[in-house]
Amino acid sequence: MKKKDYLYILSNGRVAAINKKDGSIVWEVKLKAYLTSAMTLTYGQITVEGDKLFIGSTGMLLCLSTKDGALIWKNELKGWGYNFVSMANVSNEAVAASASAAASAAVVAATV
């Protein structure tokens, strides 16, 4: 299958590639495996550029392979705190996702 046949999701500390045609999970990764601290990535923003999947959440940036979710690199953004991470990419594919994620983060912050 081609990458355009997949939908990438981030929820409750997991990232998955979903087959758009039948809804099946192609691959799934628990992000906790990539973290050095006890923090969890429960919500955030996700965007795709080429063969890379970028995830920004609670003071952490991760770059995963779109092929299988393997970690390419991570940046713990030391000194930036643990707030929502907003991203923009060259093609602006993440604009709608950013607005939705920011709204979700605002609801979470309002209930805490």
Image (cartoon, grey):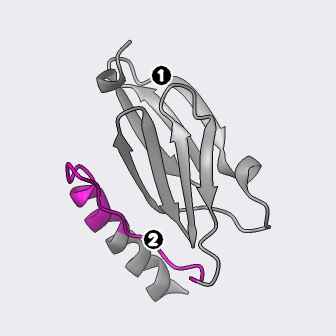
- The relative height of residue 8 versus residue 78 in the rendered view (above or below) is above
Mark 2 → mark 1, Cα distance in angstroms: 28 Å
Q: Is residue 63 left or right of residue 52?
A: right
User: The magenta stretch spans which residues?
Assistant: 80-101
**On-image quarter of the N terminus:** top left
- The relative height of residue 52 versus residue 112 in the rendered view (above or below) is above
Residue 42 spot, x, y in % from top left: 58, 61
Report which quarter residue 52 is drawn in.
Answer: top left
- Most common secondary structure along the magenta stretch: loop
Q: Nearer the viewer, residue 45 or 66?
A: 66
Q: Is residue 14 left or right of residue 45?
A: right
Numbered circle sitting on residue 24: 1
Q: Residues within 10 Å of mark 2 (few under 14, many from 20)?
A: many
Which residue is depicted at the point 47% across and 62% down? 44
* Disc 1, SS: loop
Res. 13 in view: no
Q: Nearer the viewer, residue 27 or 85?
A: 85
Q: Residues within 10 Å of mark 1 (few under 14, many from 20)?
A: few
- Disc 1 residue type? Ser
Res. 2 in view: yes
Residue 63 spot, x, y in % from top left: 53, 47
Which residue is depicted at the point 55% across and 41% down? 64
Question: Which residue in the structure is indicated by mark 2?
Answer: 85
